[in-house]
Amino acid sequence: MTSFEAGKTYKTRSICDSNCWFSITVASRTAKTIKTEKGKTLRIGSYDGAEFVKPMGSYSMAPIIRAA
């Protein structure tokens, strides 16, 4: 399984605008959560052999950042 690592930056494109990028930098992590450098705590999920987080919440067009 691909996991988030502290100190690394992960990013994804917006589903609506390919010029818009969402990114997070992992400051620390536990088994079930990560904390970003901005102090936000995000719950980790897993799908298809990789961990993921939803930094903007959960809604129909929400960005999903995978640890790939």
Image (spheres, rainbow, N blue to C red):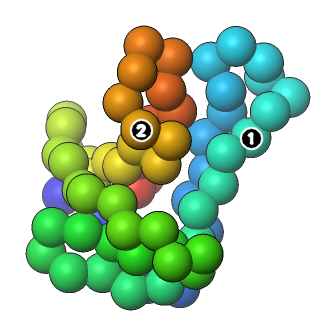
**Quadrant occupied by the N terminus:** bottom left
Tell me which amino acid carries mark 2.
Gly
Q: Is residue 11 left or right of residue 33?
A: right
Between 16 and 47, the one nearer to me in the picture: 16
Q: Is 25 situated above or below 53?
A: below
Q: Is residue 9 left or right of residue 4?
A: right
Residue at the spot 40% in from the left edge and 21% down from the top edge: 59
Give the residue number, with chain letter if any, for mark 2: 57
- Using the rendered view, name the quadrant where residue 2 is placed: bottom left
Q: Is 67 situated above or below 59?
A: below
Residue 65 shows up from this direction:
no
User: Could you classify mark 2 by the number of other residues whose Cα lies within 10 Å: few (under 14), some (14-19), or many (20 or more)?
Assistant: few
In percent of width and height, residue 24 lies at 58, 62
Indicate the secondary structure of the residue bearing disc 2: loop
Q: Is 49 situated above or below 48?
A: below
Name the N-terminal-most of marks 1 and 2.
1
Residue at the spot 61% in from the left edge and 41% down from the top edge: 12
Residue 27 shows up from this direction:
yes
Indicate the secondary structure of the residue bearing disc 1: strand
Q: How many marks?
A: 2
Give the residue number, with chain letter if any, for mark 1: 21
User: Could you classify mark 1 by the number of other residues whose Cα lies within 10 Å: few (under 14), some (14-19), or many (20 or more)?
Assistant: few
